[in-house]
Structures are given as C-alpha cells and as structure tokens.
C-alpha cells in the first residue's frame, strides 16, 4: 500500500477496502485472518488520510499577521449613532430620543437663553391647554385637584425652580412648542427647526 499517495486515490482505496470488508463478512470463503488483515489496512489508510487532509496548525505569529492584514485590507467603519429626531438651534442639531425629549430640551434651551421671558412663555403656553398649565414655577399649579403623588409622577424640574408637565401627547407637544418659541421672540421653523421623525 502506498501511504504517500494522492489523498483522492487514498480515499477511493479506502472506500474499496470498506466494501471488501463488508463483503468478506457475508462470504464463506473469507477467514477471520483475512478480515483482520483488511481491517488493519483500512485503519492504516484512515490514519494516512487523516494526516494528509488535516489542516496545518498555524502559529500564533501567523494568526496575528492574518488578523492585522484583514483589518488593513477591510477597515471596519465605526457606526455613527445618530438620532433621526431632534431640533436645530443656532446651527447646531441636538439629537433627541422621543417627542417628549424634544419638548423638554427645547423648553430647557429657551429657559437658559431667555430667562427674562420665562413668565411670558409660561403664560402663552397656558393658553394652549384647556384648564392646565404646562410650565409653572410651582409644581402644584401644573395639575388642578390632583394628588401630590400624581404631581410628582407627571412633572419634571426644568430649570431654576420651574417645572414642566410631562403628561402630554405628541400632538399637544406639536402645539405647545411653536407657541413657546414665538413667545421667546424666536421664529418657529427658522430659528428653531424640529425634526419629528
């Protein structure tokens, strides 16, 4: 038997030996010694096939070199996480995570930049609601006849003791923000542009 033969030839011979062993078990002419000899030949061929077809183990240096060359050849772009919604103010886009986030951040920006107009903004926004304030310097004034727990749950500190109502729908927010921006003396759609989706 030629152990250094081509792996494909060895594989064909291995299959033939397997067939001979299967037939030898069913034939009367085969002796246990012949079957044992065929099985030994098959086992030697199996070892030779295994050695011929087993991939060569790479050294650590080769593995590192492959990884480095793969990174150089195909650099991975770092995905930039940008929010599809937010608002632009003073040529700076501020990404937000939700409609409520836009509401809170626009009002916060107005509160920081126009402290002298806070009362006017709060009064103008109150006209959007039926009988409630959306911005107040007293938390309890946001909700009429509600329990303190409710008030704490649905109000958030805006800035400097001013609170906002966060129990608002996106539709209501779309009505409140233009009024607040105009009350601050800015132009809705040009000074502050909101990208809702």
Image (cartoon, helix red, strand yellow):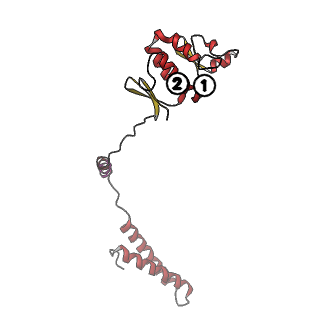
Horizontal side, residue 98 vs residue 140: left or right: left
Q: What residue is shown at x 36% (from left), y 73% (from top)?
A: 7
The residue that mark 2 highlights is: 103
Q: Residues within 10 Å of mark 2 (few under 14, many from 20)?
A: many
Which region is colored magenta? 61-67
Magenta stretch, main secondary structure class: helix
Q: Residue at x 52, y 11 (%)?
A: 120
Left or right for 107, reference 2: right
Residue 66 in magenta? yes
185 relative to 26 in the view: left or right: left
According to the picture, the residue beneath numbered tag 1 turns out to be 168
Q: Residue furthest top?
A: 116
Asked whether disc 1 touches disc 2, contact meaning CB atoms under 8 Å apart, the reply is yes
Question: Does residue 138 appear in this view?
Answer: yes
Estimate the x, y position of residue 64 in percent, counting from the top left: 31, 48
Q: CA distance from mark 1 to mark 2?
A: 10 Å
Q: Secondary structure at mark 1?
A: loop
């Amino acid at each position: 038997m030629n152990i250094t033969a081509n792996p494909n030839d060895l594989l064909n011979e291995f299959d033939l030996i397997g067939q001979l062993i299967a037939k030898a078990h069913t034939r009367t002419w085969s002796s246990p010694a012949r079957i044992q000899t065929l099985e030994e030949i098959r086992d030697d061929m199996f070892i030779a096939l295994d050695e011929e077809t087993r991939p060569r183990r790479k050294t650590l240096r080769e593995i590192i070199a492959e990884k480095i060359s793969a990174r150089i050849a195909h650099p991975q772009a770092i995905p930039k996480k940008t929010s599809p919604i937010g608002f632009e103010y003073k040529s700076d886009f501020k990404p937000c995570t939700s409609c409520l986030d836009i509401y809170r951040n626009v009002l916060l920006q107005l509160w920081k930049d126009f402290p002298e107009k806070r009362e006017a903004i709060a009064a103008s926004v109150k006209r959007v609601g039926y009988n409630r304030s959306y911005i107040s310097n007293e938390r309890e004034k946001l909700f009429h006849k509600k329990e303190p727990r409710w008030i704490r749950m649905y109000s958030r500190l805006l800035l400097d003791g001013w609170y906002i109502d966060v129990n608002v729908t996106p539709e209501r927010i779309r009505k409140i923000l233009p009024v607040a921006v105009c009350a601050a003396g800015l132009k809705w759609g040009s000074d502050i542009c909101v990208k809702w989706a």
